[in-house]
Image (cartoon, grey):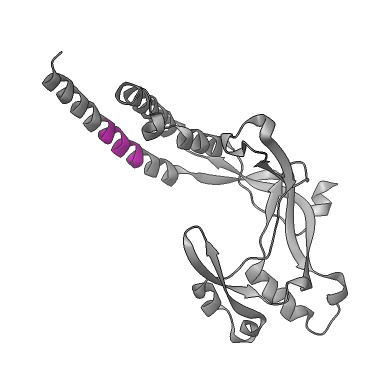
């Protein structure tokens, strides 16, 4: 095979890869539109949730109602199956190699949520005095947010977590997406045998695990203890 023939073959396969990706986007959009949620007859337990609540010594104060309303704007949650709320970090001299022997389990940090400009403007005027404009630097440059002044008013609480709906979607469309992904991987192996980052299927594996999870994460804050029993 001559040089020109190899170039034509390479260009033809690149066009085929572009067409496959285009078809995958269309099917993925149709798949998302086909998703619906079916209520379960009985809510099922699904790990633990950690949220912020008003401190016990402030619940009987005169401003308890105001603090509770402020909390609805800045509250955030984390989930854990075993209730330990741990994260994996890579430590040691060779932490960039991401080997299993360099892994360490550390506690996940959880803070109240900072508000963007749009969220701050939507907030009632009587709550704005509890926030201040905070600037911080990241690897992407300077950022800013509206942060809560008195964060000590709230404390973390772990509650049972339940799911109330089942996820149902068109499995035929998902089978077509998986078939296209297999073809995309084959073409990527032929085009870039030594560099598969162009056609990595890590995104597909993540989406596959997400879609195969049959239940939604709907928090049932009220009556959680009763359901646990």
Q: Residue at x 68, y 30 (%)?
A: 101
Residue 112 among those drawn in magenta: no
The vertical placement of 198 against 33, above or below, is: above
Q: Position of residue 128 (x, y in %)?
A: 61, 83
Image quadrant where residue 5 sits: top left
Q: Is residue 206 left or right of residue 126?
A: left
Q: Is residue 218 visible?
A: yes
Q: Main secondary structure of the magenta part?
A: helix
Q: Is residue 170 visible?
A: no
Total marks in image = 0
Q: Which residues are magenta?
A: 17-26
Closer to the camera, 32 or 106? 106
As drawn, the residue found furthest toward the front would be: 93
Q: Position of residue 115 (x, y in %)?
A: 57, 71
Say which quadrant the N terminus sits in.
top left
As drawn, the residue found furthest toward the top would be: 1
Q: Position of residue 177 (x, y in %)?
A: 39, 32
The vertical placement of 192 against 36, above or below, is: above
Residue 25 among those drawn in magenta: yes
Image quadrant where residue 133 sits: bottom right
Q: Is residue 207 left or right of residue 41?
A: left
Q: Position of residue 193 (x, y in %)?
A: 36, 22
The vertical placement of 25 against 100, above or below, is: below
Q: Residue at x 69, y 71 (%)?
A: 71
């Amino acid at each position: 095979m001559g040089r020109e023939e190899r170039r034509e073959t390479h260009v033809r396969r690149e066009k085929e890869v572009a067409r496959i990706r285009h078809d995958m986007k269309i099917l993925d959009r149709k798949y998302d539109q086909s998703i619906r949620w079916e209520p379960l007859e009985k809510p099922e337990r699904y790990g633990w949730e950690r949220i912020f609540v008003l401190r016990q010594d402030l619940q009987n104060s005169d401003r308890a109602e105001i603090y509770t309303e402020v909390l609805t704007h800045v509250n955030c949650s984390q989930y854990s199956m075993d209730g330990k709320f741990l994260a994996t970090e890579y430590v040691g001299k060779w932490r960039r190699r991401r080997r299993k022997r360099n892994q360490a389990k550390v506690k996940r940090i959880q803070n109240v949520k900072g508000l963007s400009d749009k969220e701050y403007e939507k907030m009632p005027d009587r709550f704005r005095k509890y926030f201040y404009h905070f600037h911080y630097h990241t690897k992407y440059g300077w950022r800013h947010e509206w942060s809560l002044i008195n964060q000590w008013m709230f404390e973390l609480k772990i509650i049972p977590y339940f799911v109330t709906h089942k996820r149902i979607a068109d499995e035929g469309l998902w089978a077509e997406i998986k078939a296209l992904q297999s073809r995309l991987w084959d073409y990527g192996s032929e085009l870039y045998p030594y560099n598969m980052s162009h056609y990595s299927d890590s995104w597909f594996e993540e989406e596959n695990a997400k879609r195969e999870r049959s239940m939604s994460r709907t928090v049932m804050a009220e009556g959680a203890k009763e359901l646990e029993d």
